[in-house]
Image (cartoon, grey):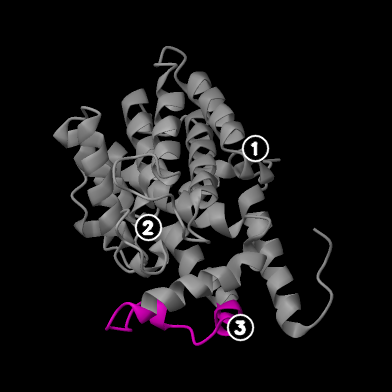
Amino acid sequence: MFPLGVTKDPTAVEVEVQNAYCAMFPHGDKLFVPQVFGWANECFTGQYANYQAVDAKYHDFEHTLQGTLCMVRLLHGRQQAAADPPLNGKLFQLGLVAILFHDTGYLKEKGDVEGTGAKYTVTHVVRSTEFAAQFLKTKGFRAEDIQSIQNMILCTGVNASLNLIPFQSELEKIMGYALGTADLLGQMAAEDYVDKLPVLYSEFAEAAHHQREKTNIVGMFSSADDLMRKTPVFWEKYVQPKLSREFGGLYRYLNQPFPFGPNFYLQRIEANMNQLQCLLDGSTPPAK
């Protein structure tokens, strides 16, 4: 069974990711994982260039760590299942950078004092690709590798047209789909997901205040209660089909054992949906 509370401790997440990386690629660069975690920590804590520490309350650094841990677990499971095409160390590294930087679009520059980074909800995916490119150029990344990372980040857009993303290889596409899968599963399986839904609504409300058009997700909810009531439907009608169809069912590599064992992430999400429904109904939720 996967522990989830570990995402409150960046060091613990880094250790698990490093262990998985070394198990998957025993001859890989042992310094890469701590290096890229250091980069992400630098960016999210306001130690990079002219950027402030992240101040979005839902899309914080723990949110990024939730997705990162889920993605690495999924990729490790995929390798253990001997799936084709086999993943190589280079794409794993690029994918790790992509998931760690996929929400840097919420970061504000130091002169940006109005509201929180949540105001960039609608544009945060594109802003994340731009931030990643800017940062990675300073680290000497090649143009094609930066493009690969940007393509993966684009998979996290709620309404992303995946068929329009210019993937450079089948493996790159798989990594992008793994990132999109983990971004959804990681947050929705969190032990405090239900408790943080009002916080998510507050981000949507701030974003709606800062944009003219209300035709996207930030304008879909009239209140925190409205968002909470619509979340089970969001899981059933949007997330599950997206995981199975658009993202190719990669979540199955989290089954333990593969292919027919239980999927702890899906179990946790179902438990969260049950807890949420009981909260909405005023009944007593089952023990976790």
Residue, disc 3: 225
Q: Quadrant where the C terminus lies?
A: bottom right
Could you give the CA–CA distance between mark 3 and mark 2, rounded to whole angstroms?
24 Å
Residue contact at pointers 2 and 1, CB within 8 angstroms: no
Residue, disc 1: 257
Range shown magenta: 209-230
Could you give the CA–CA distance between mark 3 and mark 1, rounded to whole angstroms?
38 Å
Residue contact at pointers 3 and 1, CB within 8 angstroms: no
Residue, disc 2: 106
Could you give the CA–CA distance between mark 2 and mark 1, rounded to whole angstroms?
37 Å
Residue 22, how many percent across, how many down? 50, 19
Crowdedness near tag 3: few (<14), some (14–19) or many (≥20) residues, C-alpha within 10 Å: some
Residue at left offset 52%, top offset 30%: 17
Q: Classify residue 80 as left or right of residue 171.
A: right
Kind of element beneath mark 3: helix
Kind of element beneath mark 1: loop
First reached walking from the N terminus: tag 3 or tag 2: 2
Residue at left offset 58%, top offset 30%: 16
Residue 247, how many percent across, how many down? 40, 54
